[in-house]
Amino acid sequence: MAELPGPLEISLWPLLMALPIAFIVYQLRLSHRAKNIITRWLTWFLDCLGHAISNAEVTLSNVLFKAQLWDNLNQNPINERQRYIINLMLRDDFVGHMNTSKYATLATCSKDTALRDILDLKDSAVFIQNPERGRSNSYRLIKLHPF
């Protein structure tokens, strides 16, 4: 049975996969040509490691935010539509803010039901209303304590 990679390997893997293989091979060849001088390769590797650590910090911050949000949400019951919308808004590819029409379309419900759900989430301090008013009413998720 294969061992799971350690935390360092998991953090470095996406970064290394984003680099062209030719660049990695070039860096390794440069370090082998020079006799006992691997400074250039070590500099490159430590730079990659620094980027991987920064990416890991961002990922960890997002995970902790989601965990804290769900801990707060579990104190008050929410329905399946609300849970679905919150999960959509937590995704990295979610664009913009939530309004009644968008909610109704995504949750496949009426605009009246969408408005009730949104107001319930606002009263539960999950959504914050943006400054725009009238037909431009939109809502965003609260920002909890930063990590």
Image: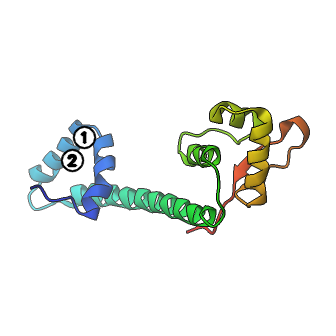
- Identify the residue at horizontal 63%, vertical 69% (top origin): 145
Name the mark on residue 23: 1
Q: Position of residue 22 (x, y in %)?
A: 21, 37
Q: Nearer the viewer, residue 85 or 140?
A: 85
Q: Nearer the viewer, residue 145 or 78?
A: 78
At a point 76% along the width and 53% down the height, the residue shown is: 120
User: Where 12 falls versus 136 (above or below)?
Assistant: below
Give the camera-side residue of 102 and 95.
Answer: 102
Q: Position of residue 6 (x, y in %)?
A: 23, 63
Q: Is residue 140 left or right of residue 8?
A: right
What is the three-letter code of the residue carrying label 1?
A: Phe
Looking at the picture, how far across and down is residue 133, in whole percent? 89, 43
Instruction: Identify the residue under disc 2.
Output: 27
Residue 38, disc: none
Q: Residue at x 41, y 59 (%)?
A: 56
Dot 2, crowdedness within 10 Å: few (<14), some or many (≥20)?
Answer: some
Give the secondary structure at mark 2: helix
Marks 1 & 2, CB-CB < 8 Å contact: yes
Could you say which quadrant of the image residue 44 lies in? Answer: bottom left
The quadrant the N terminus occupies is: bottom left
